Amino acid sequence: MNLAHLLARTARVFPEQPAVALGKSELYSYGEWFRRAATIAGGLRALPGLQTGDRVALFMANCPQYLELLYGIWHAGLVAVPINHKLHAREVAFIVDDSAAALLFVAGDLGEEERIWREKNPDLRIVSVDDAAYRRLTSTDPIAIVARAPDDLAWLFYTSGTTGQPKGVMLSQRNLLAMTLTYFPDVDQATPSNSILYAAPMSHGAGMYNFAHVLVGARHVVPESGGFDAQEILSLSRHFGQVSLFAAPTMVRRLVDHVADQDADCSGIKTIVYGGGPMYLEDIRRALDVLGDRLVQIYGQGESPMTITALSRRHLADRAHPRHRERIASVGVAHSVVEVVIADTDDQPLPAGTTGEVLVRGETVMQGYWRNPEATAATLRNGWLHTGDIGSLDADGFLTLKDRSKDVIISGGANIYPREVEEVLLRHAAVAEVSVVGRPNAEWGEEVVAFIVCQPGVSAPIAELDRLCLDSIARFKRPKDYIFVAALPRNNYGKVLKTALRRHWTQQGGNGS
Ligand code: AMP
């Protein structure tokens, strides 16, 4: 078993099918994609010292070479280590070192960054896809696909590391195949007339959706910007039609604003899969109004990539359902290949309606953390993946997430889920973004503090924010302090860094109370 067979199969069945485009320019067919992958594999295996199972890292913005390289790496029996291209050179050096990558592929010219990488990894081979070395690699003799076993490592996925150093999540060939096959029943149908548009980093979930689209022979479109640009996405969607894309909630919001402000035509978009972070109720409502029934939500984490639960287009569209509001605020139901339970601290399943930790088991759950048995043992216990997310299941199996367990605020012995308070504050017209965290307090343990970003040119009076909370949630959940900021600190995946917010008072030298 080797994921490279997915491409080989489609290339055999539909060799002429358009496969990869850069912007509106068609680059090559499936037959050609497979030939390129087989040649890259030949070039990689001709490098001295490279053995089956060795790691090859990729550090570049979305580009067409990403796709041929991924398949070249698997074809050669190697392991891909895709690295978020927005990471700092030192973070990249850490990942290259931790994964013991034999080779690092990059794009463009290297300057200072190369020096930093070499400081830690003096023997590292670095190949830029824009250099002659890459052209040589892609013009050697092709080789046959190297056989791999189902549990062999295919993708080493580094967590976003919102706390501490990133950890390498070991995803096997079997994990990724299961993730791919569950796309069709749980997320969306796909056909050869569809196109997948890479508007989010290929190093993350967006890149993992390549497999389902390779399997059906759909077109893969890489935006020329290499990233997320609402106007470009709409223009490419109108050009190709039947486009699917993965987008983080912040991207969906930008797309919705653009479509609403410009009255833009989004008919070329077939499906937007959103997830990777919380989408607030107000935002999803507006997205459904503005974009129509094009949305599907997934909830996953690197440790069970893209595959814990999904909220289908059908459920999002079923506005007449008596529990529609609760459902669109949920993350949907378990993917077909996993079991999801809510458990207490002893891993005992809790009844519907009870809040506890989300546990997952099944075919998509990682093999463990790379060279980190302690972290593996802490996360994979009693046969379950401990997600660190807190939530509850309803009687129909819909999961509602409350928050990450480490973000729960405990004040006077009561648990407060920041997201609940954030949802309320976001209802104020002047509030653009909000993040709620706990601040140490001598009397209560912790107290609720809200960081608020206002809409441009307006302010949100504290009395009105207080009133909104008093009208909607228990008194003890109301923020004791509001801190107005220009922007929320986010990591390179767009996730709010609550640890950075908490530093606000540690840096001020007191506990703020
Ligand atoms: P990562 O492994 O970096 O992709 O982060 C995964 C975490 O993001 C999960 O454990 C959740 O806390 C959060 N997350 C992912 N998808 C969703 C979603 N649809 N709604 C809310 N939070 C999500």
Image (spheres, rainbow, N blue to C red):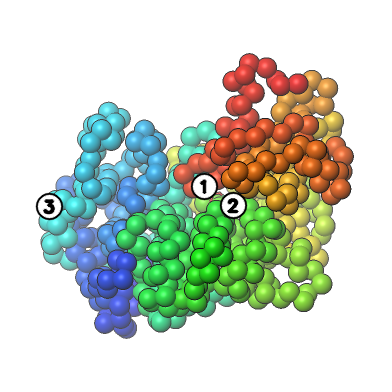
Residue 117 percent coordinates (x, y): 29, 34
Res. 193 visible in picture: yes
Residue density around tag 1, few if under 14, some if 14–19, many if 20 or more, within 10 Å: some
Please tell me which residue is depicted at 25% across the width and 33% down the height of the picture: 112
- Quadrant location, the C terminus: top right
Q: Secondary structure at mark 3?
A: helix
Q: Is mark 1 within 8 Å of ligand 1?
A: no
Please tell me which residue is depicted at 55% across the width and 45% down the height of the picture: 495
Please tell me which residue is depicted at 23% across the width and 36% down the height of the picture: 111
Please tell me which residue is depicted at 69% across the width and 58% down the height of the picture: 282
* Amino acid on which disc 2 is placed: Gly
Q: Which residue carries the number 3 mark?
A: 132
* Amino acid on which disc 3 is placed: Ala
Instruction: Determine contact: label 1, label 2, CB under 8 Å.
Output: yes
Q: Which residue carries the number 2 mark?
A: 277
Answer above or below: position of 261 versus 382. Answer: below
- In this view, the residue in front, 476 or 402, is 476
Considering only order in the chain, which callout, 3 or 2, is on the residue closer to the N terminus? Answer: 3
User: Marks 1 and 3, how far apart in space?
Assistant: 35 Å
* Amino acid on which disc 1 is placed: Gly
- Quadrant location, the N terminus: bottom left
In the image: residue 319, left or right of residue 260: right
- In this view, the residue in front, 451 or 321, is 451
User: Marks 2 and 3, how far apart in space?
Assistant: 40 Å
Q: Quadrant of residue 287?
A: bottom right
User: Which dot marks residue 494?
Assistant: 1
Q: Secondary structure at mark 2?
A: loop
Q: Secondary structure at mark 1?
A: loop
Mark nearer the viewer, 1 or 3: 1
